[in-house]
Image (cartoon, rainbow, N blue to C red):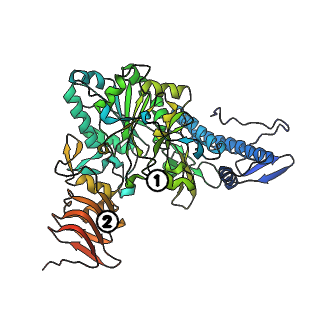
Amino acid sequence: MYTSASSTVRRNAASGQSLTTQGAAMEFGSGYNTLTGNDIWSLRTNFAKGHKRTPSDVEFRDAMRKDAQSAMNKELNKLLTTAPPGMQEQVRKEFDGFENLFGRFLRETGPSVEWEKLKLLAPEAIRKYSELNVPAGQDTKALLDQLVVIKLNGGLGTSMGCTGPKSAIQVRNELTFLDLNVQQIEYMNKSYGVDVPLVLMNSFNTDEDTQKILRKYSQIKVSIVTFNQSRYPRINRDTLMPVPRSFGEESIEGWYPPGHGDVYNSLYNSGLLERFIKEGKKYVFISNIDNMGATVDLNILYFLLNSPQHEAPEFVMEVTDKTRADVKGGTLIEYEGKLRLLEYAQVPSDHVDEFKSVSKFKIFNTNNLWISLDAIKRNVEEATLHMEIIVNPKTLDNGMNVIQLETAVGAAIKSFERAVGINVPRSRFLPVKTTSDLLIVMSNLYAMKTGALEMSPKRSFPSVPLVKLGHQFSKVKDFLTRFASIPDLLELDHLTVAGDVNFGKNVSLRGTVIIIANHGEKIDIPMGSILENKIVSGNLRILDH
């Protein structure tokens, strides 16, 4: 029988009756009140909006919560019996984590941040990258021998029209995200005579395909190891019960990976955390595999390892200056005496404009994180990690409304001692979330060097242009067919493209360029065109003859 401390069935002390119904009805004395998951959801939402609680409301809500938690536990027990042979112990650990999250979802009401308690950071809370010391060459090997690199590799490329892991999308010279990350680590290891391991946190969605891809690196001198983040059941929005009926293929749509905040427990459960600590590793550098700017930085590593032990930060978050393109990015604040990550989703609606202000909240989180391995172990074992729950609503192919409970890795910053932010150059934040981003990294704005992308010295100013491509470009396949070759973007500030637009070879875009083909119209930008501070609209066809 699978049980957890958070989900043991509780009995009504007065009546001795168990609250054991499956989220459909609850026993009160001699009668039944029919209650669906919507009732619990509505009650939770209403309290969150600040409705006044009466004693009877609280008692009613607590009874529903206990019933929902008990019913969830029973369903998880059934699911556990369908786990693949040899996997039950691992699944049990993952279900413990899920039940803890589900219990918090039922229990925690009200805003996660009270705006009045929020404080802007003191200047010393954010270190300037330019003020970090540069390590001497002879120290480099000793520094790198204490480092582990984790790349978050759980995402699929579906948003860009690809199947399989997003890390398999080609970025430059037919090299993928994964290729470039491996090349970076290989070059560093060769240069300094070290063996920094590259660790991939996969999901059940990406693991099989990633394992196949890794075979091609057998001759590459990089120690590549993998572990999987947890596999959690999606929750039926109406019943608050798990969607999948088994671990079989027929229920695959009912499962999800619970966000990169799961990295702490999954790394611990995999046994890799203990292994790395025994090998003398001190810090892990965690970043998204699609962030082409997230390379190992020796100055930050030196700052961590050269600080006196009682002053060394357990957690460093790389932040960078916010621009108008980053107004929804999470930022660092002081809250109840601790450094804390404030996400857009946590901001009350009447303070959204204030949050977006680049003058008040000047920096945002790059999700490049440096964390003490010993501190991760302590937090997991003492159950002191706390990350705000992200409730992610989805609709399945069959029309069922579900919710996913997720967490973000950076939100754990408040659980670590002496945490700091470091304001790094914008070049360390180069994510590829859309084909608009892909156009930038594929262009001559960047030169590729040993797997890393560096801004071309030919660009006269360091800022990255703002590029917005319409939905006709959103899939990688469509994107590639609309460009005969990637345009020259060295002097581009802003590009907006909407509608049925195609680009010929050797096009140059400079300044602000806006190209709009209205519905039913088509624009072909001729080969060799130079567009500088231009607006192009209407029809433009170049026909072969």
> Where is mark 1, residue-wise?
356
Number of callouts: 2
The residue at 29%/46% (across/down) is: 177
Contact between labelled residues 1 and 2, with CB atoms less than 8 Å apart: no
**Given the image, on which type of amino acid does mark 1 rest?**
Lys
The mark found on residue 483 in the picture is none
**Quarter of the view holding residue 509:** bottom left
x, y percent for residue 525: 21, 71
Instruction: Let me know if residue 223 appears in the view.
Output: no
Q: Going by the image, does 238 lie left or right of 248?
A: right
| Residue carrying label 2 | 496
In the figure, is residue 169 to the left or right of 315?
Answer: left
Is label 2 or label 1 in front? 1
The three-letter code of the residue at mark 2 reads: Thr
Q: Secondary structure at mark 1?
A: helix
Observer able to see residue 398: yes
Asked if 420 appears above or below 399 in the picture, the reply is above
Identify which residue, 250 or 107, lies in the foreground.
107
- Work out which quarter of the rendered image holds the N terminus and state it: top right
- Mark 2 falls on what kind of element? strand
Q: Marks 2 and 1, Cα distance to the nearest angstrom?
A: 22 Å
Left or right relative to 412: residue 469:
left
N-terminal of the two: label 2 or label 1? Answer: 1
Q: Position of residue 213 (x, y in %)?
A: 30, 43
Image quadrant containing the C terminus: bottom left
Crowding near the residue tagged with mark 1, few <14, some 14–19, many ≥20 C-alpha atoms within 10 Å: many
Q: Residue furthest left?
A: 545
Q: Residues within 10 Å of mark 2 (few under 14, many from 20)?
A: some
Q: Position of residue 453 (x, y in %)?
A: 24, 45
Closer-to-camera residue (37/303) = 303
Residue under the image location 23 percent in, 77 percent down = 540
